[in-house]
């Protein structure tokens, strides 16, 4: 028998649209393999919501060029007011990350958890700023938070950090956490481009935003490092605890000198056994997993463990459908328990 799981979601951007497409495409698989069917009740945007108590038609939502033109659209109805009032099982937050105060997502989390809803998110803000508070809030309300998409997108690195290393403590993490920075440094090292030229190319290819400050300044990587280290090592850190240095000042001369000595320069996030966290450009041996295998916009995560020594995971750490895949994985895991 298939279990109907109702959910509401905030943010209908690239990831939100990809999630609707994924749910539509994988409806039969999710039902056959997991005994679940997800019914979308609400889509919250900054100026209103799409809502139907009986569940929205995913095909109609996916096909709509403008969801505000659909008859279920209710202008002025906002997530902060509606989450507590509505009855569904899982709240999914895919609003943009705010590294200053985590809003509006952290308010959404509080309202969802206090009204008996589990939370799944691709938004890093609340977790990089208030990880301990958010997890305590979930525990107090007997609910769960799925956040695989916040670090590494579809790479199951949070799963590994949460339970894949049970009984095998992590003593150190080294990670390439930001695809934009990695792409720029990779292009500088392989095509001998100046930083500005490589950045422009990254923007033209969609790897970097028009304002790339969060990526090239190391802040996006710092937030992800906090979430990963807190999960894997039981820390209670925030982004303010991370010593952060961007890649803006990496020169082609530095890239060339590193190459002659057998190294590449990578923006590396590290967490050690003393709880020190930092993100900055570092020399990485070319013949190491971090140096040899990590090209283009790929991400990599190296866990140093007490029993299994080094474990390295590599994969695509960005993309709308990749993030949606991680969200769907969390929705399934949370709904089956």
Image: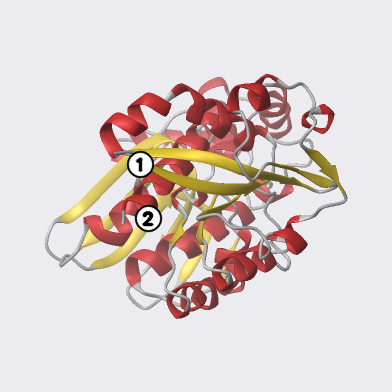
User: Do the numbered discs 1 and 2 sit on residues whose CB atoms are within 8 Å?
Assistant: yes
Q: Position of residue 98 (x, y in %)?
A: 71, 58
Expressed as whole percent of the image width and height from the top left, the position of residue 124 reads: 58, 56
Quadrant housing residue 312: top left
- Earlier along the polypeptide chain: callout 1 or callout 2? 2
Pick out the residue farthest to the left.
Answer: 307
Q: Residue at x 83, y 43 (%)?
A: 74
- Reply above or below: 211 against 68: below
Look at the picture and state if 171 lies above or below 46: below
Q: Quadrant of the C terminus?
A: bottom left
170 relative to 30 in the view: left or right: left
Quarter of the image holding residue 35? top left
**Residue at figure coordinates x 47%, y 68% from the top left:** 277
Residue under label 2, please give it: 174
Which secondary structure lies at badge 1? Answer: helix
Image coords of residue 58 (percent x, y): 59, 28
Q: Looking at the picture, tell me which residue is in the foreground, 96 or 260.
A: 96
Question: Looking at the image, can residue 288 be seen?
Answer: no
């Amino acid at each position: 028998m298939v279990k109907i799981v109702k959910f509401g979601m905030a943010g209908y951007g690239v990831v939100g649209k990809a999630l609707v497409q994924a749910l539509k495409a994988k409806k039969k698989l999710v039902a056959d393999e997991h005994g679940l069917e997800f019914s979308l009740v609400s889509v919250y945007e900054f100026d209103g919501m799409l809502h139907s108590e009986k569940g929205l038609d995913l095909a109609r939502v996916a096909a709509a060029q403008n969801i505000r033109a659909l008859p279920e659209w209710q202008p002025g109805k906002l997530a902060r007011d509606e989450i507590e009032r509505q009855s569904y099982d899982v709240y999914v937050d895919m609003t943009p990350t705010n590294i200053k105060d985590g809003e509006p997502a952290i308010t959404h989390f509080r309202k969802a958890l206090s009204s008996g809803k589990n939370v799944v998110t691709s938004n890093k803000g609340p977790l990089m700023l208030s990880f301990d508070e958010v997890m305590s809030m979930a525990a107090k309300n007997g609910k769960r938070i799925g956040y695989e998409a916040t670090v590494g997108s579809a790479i199951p690195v949070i799963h590994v950090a949460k339970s894949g290393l049970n009984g095998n403590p992590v003593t150190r993490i080294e990670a390439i956490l930001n695809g934009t920075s990695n792409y720029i440094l990779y292009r500088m090292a392989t095509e001998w481009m100046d930083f500005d030229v490589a950045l422009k190319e990254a923007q033209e290819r969609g790897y970097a935003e028009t304002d790339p400050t969060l990526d090239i300044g190391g802040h996006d990587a710092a937030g992800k490092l906090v979430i990963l280290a807190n999960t894997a090592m039981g820390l209670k850190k925030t982004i303010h605890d991370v010593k952060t240095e961007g890649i803006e000042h990496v020169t082609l001369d530095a890239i060339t000198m590193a190459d002659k000595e057998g190294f590449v320069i990578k923006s590396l996030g590290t967490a050690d056994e003393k709880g020190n966290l930092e993100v900055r450009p570092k020399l990485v041996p070319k013949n190491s997993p971090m140096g040899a295998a990590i090209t283009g916009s790929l991400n990599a995560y190296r866990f140093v463990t007490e029993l299994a020594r080094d474990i390295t995971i590599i994969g695509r750490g960005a993309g709308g459908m990749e993030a949606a895949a991680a969200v769907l994985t969390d929705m399934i895991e949370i709904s089956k328990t």
